[in-house]
Image: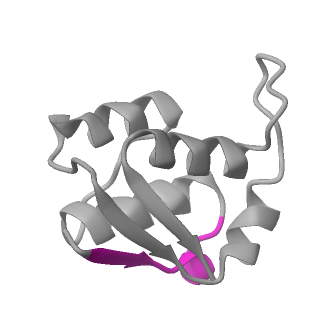
Amino acid sequence: MAGTTIDPRWAPGAPGLYCALGEALIGPGRWFGRGLDDLNDCLGGQRGAIGPFTLIWHDADIARHALNFTLDHGGRFTYFEEAARLLESRGVTVVLR
């Protein structure tokens, strides 16, 4: 997977993130779960996406605004930051545009 793009404009928020990632990485109508644990599983190859690859995140400010909350377990990063960090920890180069 050379370079994959996601565009959050049509479905901001966490559900939109997983839908956009699923469609971009594993095909139309596919999704990447409902939370960061599911995303971690999916990036581990259980649903077909294994790094390294580049993810171009268009209109990242929309997602940054929609995901500007911290997790209940006292996280120090916003949900947006947690998702980006998880992607990068799994070998995904995240390019924010």
Q: Can you tell which quarter of the image residue 47 is in?
A: top left
Q: Is residue 5 left or right of residue 75?
A: left
Residue under the point 53% across and 63% down: 16
Q: Position of residue 78 (x, y in %)?
A: 79, 43
- Tell me if residue 61 is in the magenta stretch: no
Q: Is residue 90 left or right of residue 51?
A: right
Find the magenta span and give its range. 3-12
As rendered, which of 74 and 33 lies closer to the eye? 74
Q: Position of residue 69 (x, y in %)?
A: 83, 44
Q: Is residue 51 left or right of residue 47?
A: right
Q: Assign the N terminus to one quadrant of the image.
A: bottom left
Residue under the point 56% across and 81% down: 10
Q: Position of residue 27 (x, y in %)?
A: 19, 68
Residue under the point 64% across and 68% down: 12
Task: Please determine whether, in this image, residue 85 is positioned above or below residue 55.
Answer: above
Task: Please determine whether, in this image, residue 60 is positioned above or below residue 43.
Answer: below
Q: Assign the C terminus to one quadrant of the image.
A: bottom right
Q: Position of residue 34 (x, y in %)?
A: 47, 40
